[in-house]
Image (tube, helix red, strand yellow):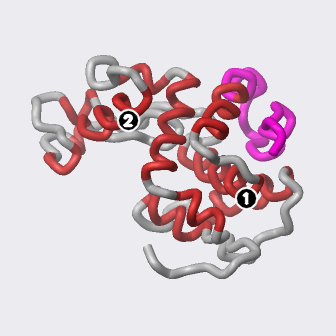
Amino acid sequence: MDALTSEQLKKIMPTAKAETIESFVDPLNQTLSEFGIDTEQRAACFLAQLAHESGALRYVKELASGEAYEGRKDLGNVEPGDGVRYKGRGLIQITGRTNYGHCGQALGEDLVANPEKLEEPLLAARSAGWFWSTRKLNDWADKGDFRTITKRINGGFNGLEDRLAYYGRAREVYGLPPADDNGDGDTETSDEV
């Protein structure tokens, strides 16, 4: 698979600003390579999902304050202020002290001490790749199962129509045939989640 170009990224995310695309194209290419998102199908799924999650690269930090995560032991938020400190960041919102720790360890960065680093283009992209890889989403992309990928990222199907629009553009950019109305590609899909 050839490297992603700024022109291709703009076609996938037409509302993204040119300077934002320029700041993310190299980090995204590094992420695609680093995390084995190395086929057109995998890249189309990955880019469509992060386009929705980030508002076309507009948001690398959750808009909400993070107070809703305060005291969430399931996220590792056990210290006062953890909810706000470890709110969602990155192109696929990494949330909670525990996830910041695991992600940082995998990426070689101390994200628990420096959570804002996930707002930088390279780490925002790499954290999305880490999330993708640890949830084995390449497997679902290979099956063409966009709905399961959505559920694994979102916990449901919030924003599915928007995600499908990005996915359709990404498939076109990569020369893939259109997916069906559920976002399923050429192969059999599974309802397993």
Position in image of residue 164 (x %, y %) = 68, 63
At 72% from the left edge and 35% from the top edge, which residue is drawn?
A: 16
In reply to whether residue 191 is colored magenta, the answer given is no
Residue 94, quarter of the rendered image = top left
Residue 50 vertical placement versus 187 (above, below)? above
- The reply, left or right, for residue 77 in relation to residue 53 is left
Classed neighbour count for the residue bearing mark 1: other residues with Cα under 10 Å, few (<14), some (14–19), many (≥20)? many
Q: Which residue is mark 1?
A: 41
Instruction: Identify the mark nearer the N-term, 1 or 2.
Output: 1
In the rendered structure, which segment of residues is drawn in magenta? 1-24
At 24% from the left edge and 35% from the top edge, which residue is drawn?
A: 97
Q: Nearer the viewer, residue 157 or 132?
A: 132
**Quadrant location, the N terminus:** top right
- The reply, left or right, for residue 191 in relation to residue 162 is left
Position in image of residue 53 (x %, y %) = 54, 47
In reply to whether residue 6 is colored magenta, the answer given is yes
Position in image of residue 123 (x %, y %) = 51, 26
- The reply, left or right, for residue 135 in relation to residue 188 is left
Position in image of residue 139 (x %, y %) = 57, 63
**Picture disc at residue 102:** none
Residue 48 vertical placement versus 14 (above, below)? below
Q: Nearer the viewer, residue 70 or 123?
A: 123
Q: Secondary structure at mark 2?
A: helix
Residue 183, quarter of the rendered image = bottom right
- The reply, left or right, for residue 68 in relation to residue 63 is left
**Picture disc at residue 103:** 2
At 81% from the left edge and 31% from the top edge, which residue is drawn?
A: 6
At 66% from the left edge and 37% from the top edge, which residue is drawn?
A: 33
